[in-house]
Amino acid sequence: MSSQATSFRFLSLVAARFIWVWSFLFIAVCCQGEQAKTPNAAPVKPIANFTDVAEKAGLTLNVNRVPADGYWSNHWMKHPLGFGNINPRPSADILLTLFFKSDAAWNECGWKNEKFDQLLAAARAETDEAKRKQMYWDMQAMVHQSSGIGIPIFLSLIDGLSTKVKGLGSIPLGGLMGYNFAENVWLEA
């Protein structure tokens, strides 16, 4: 088994559940035969913990901090292992389609699974809610068991506000109405 495949399998084992992927750190992690290091800086604590766990599994991760201003165009999805983040989506179908369908442009782990793709299409056509729910659970289990994506944290978005704030509703694309609150809210005197 290649070191990249081993790394992806390791990440799949580390992931406890599936929903959202994390990264506020703008870090690209490349698997190499050197000790984990971050040049000219102390290791970022969550990544340092991650490399410690990897070492216990027999993997050595070389952590390369990269500039935030070019991360998405220069590093995202261009290394054997990296971090990205997925904000909430209104439905499991949208999330699974955008990030795990074999031909998805944002398929960060490069996972391709024909059975998954067929199940995704079948779930959209299923009219029985209980069956459809089970199909989406089954797809999430497939992602967890074989996709090679690790999910170190899950985002919880909670909006807190004064009773004087009016017009704030729920848009499941992120906090504060999917980050569009300024267009919709007002302060009552």
Image (cartoon, rainbow, N blue to C red):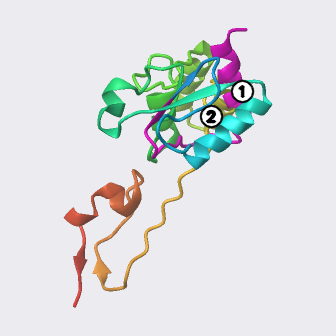
Q: Which residue is mark 1?
A: 10
Instruction: Measure how far apart labels 1 and 2 are at the Cα level.
Output: 8 Å
- CB of mark 1 within 8 Å of CB of mark 2? yes
Tell me residue 187's x, y (percent). 23, 81
Tell me residue 175's x, y (percent). 40, 59
Name the amino acid type tagged 2: Gly
- Of 156 and 141, nearer the camera is 156
* Mark 1 surroundings within 10 Å by alpha-carbon count, few (fewer than 14), some (14 through 19), many (20 or more): some
Q: Which residues are magenta?
A: 1-28
| Relative to 154, 181 lies left or right | left
Residue 102 showing in the rendered view: yes
Picture quadrant where residue 78 is located: top left
- Of 59 and 120, nearer the camera is 59
Residue sitting at 46 percent across and 41 percent down? 86
Total marks drawn?
2
Q: Which residue is mark 2?
A: 150
Q: Quadrant of the N terminus?
A: top right
Residue sitting at 62 percent across and 34 percent down? 150
The local secondary structure at tag 1 comes to helix
Tell me residue 189's x, y (percent). 22, 91
Residue sitting at 54 percent across and 45 percent down? 42
Name the amino acid type tagged 1: Phe
